[in-house]
């Protein structure tokens, strides 16, 4: 996964999930992280890493897209865990 990759919700009929619920899935996968506001977006910031995910959200914090930070320190194991969480909610890497 490089910083040009992003995850996208497949379509409007897919289940709605909040950034907080996505964060909970990362925590359950053993990835310590927290949420920070970022202008009109929300970020999930991974602890002890330079990596974060930036989410485009609606007024209810339902995201439609997520992108990895450009300064991501992404090894294969980390990238696989991130992909697994997004796979679990039906999102695809683009």
Image: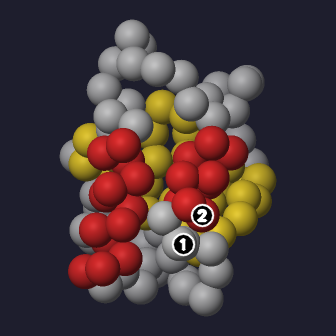
Q: Where in the figure is residue 19, as x and y percent of width and height?
A: 63, 43
Numbered tag placed on residue 49 in the rendering: none
Residue in view at x 63 percent, y 35 percent: 18
> Which residue ends up furthest to the top in the rendered image?
13
Could you tell me which quadrant the N terminus lies in? bottom left
Q: Would you say residue 83 is visible in this rendering?
A: yes
Residue at disc 1, secondary structure: loop
Question: Looking at the picture, how far across and down is residue 61, in whole percent?
Answer: 69, 32
What residue sits 40% from the left and 53% below the top? 85
Residue at label 1?
31
Q: Is residue 7 above or below residue 54?
A: above
Question: Which sits in the foreground, 68 or 75?
Answer: 75
Would you name the residue on which mark 2 appears? 27
Q: What element does badge 2 sit on? A: helix
Q: Spatial distance from mark 1 to mark 2, Cα to Cα? A: 5 Å
Residue at coordinates 43% horizontally, 72% vertically from top-left? 70
Residue 29 pos. (x, y %): 49, 64
**Which percent across, then down, holds residue 77?**
30, 80
Callout 1–callout 2 Cβ contact below 8 Å:
yes
- Within 10 Å of the Cα at label 2, are there few (<14), some (14-19), or many (20+) other Cα atoms? some
Question: From what the image shows, is residue 62 above or below residue 35?
Answer: above
Instruction: Count the labels in the image.
Output: 2
Q: Residues within 10 Å of mark 1 (few under 14, many from 20)?
A: some
- Residue 8 visible in this rendered orientation of the protein: no
| Residue drawn at the location 22% of the way across and 46% of the way down | 94
Residue 38, relative to residue 78: is it above or below? above
What is the image's colouring? Answer: secondary structure
Q: Give the image quarter of residue 43.
A: bottom right
């Amino acid at each position: 996964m490089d910083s040009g990759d992003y995850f996208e919700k497949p379509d409007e009929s897919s289940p709605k999930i909040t950034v907080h619920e996505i964060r909970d899935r990362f925590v359950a996968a053993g990835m310590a992280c927290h949420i920070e506001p970022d202008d009109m977006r929300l970020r999930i910031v991974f602890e002890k890493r330079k990596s974060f995910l930036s989410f485009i959200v609606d007024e209810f914090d339902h995201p439609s897209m997520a992108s990895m930070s450009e300064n991501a320190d992404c090894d294969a194991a980390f990238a696989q865990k991130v992909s697994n969480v997004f796979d679990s909610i039906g999102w695809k890497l683009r």
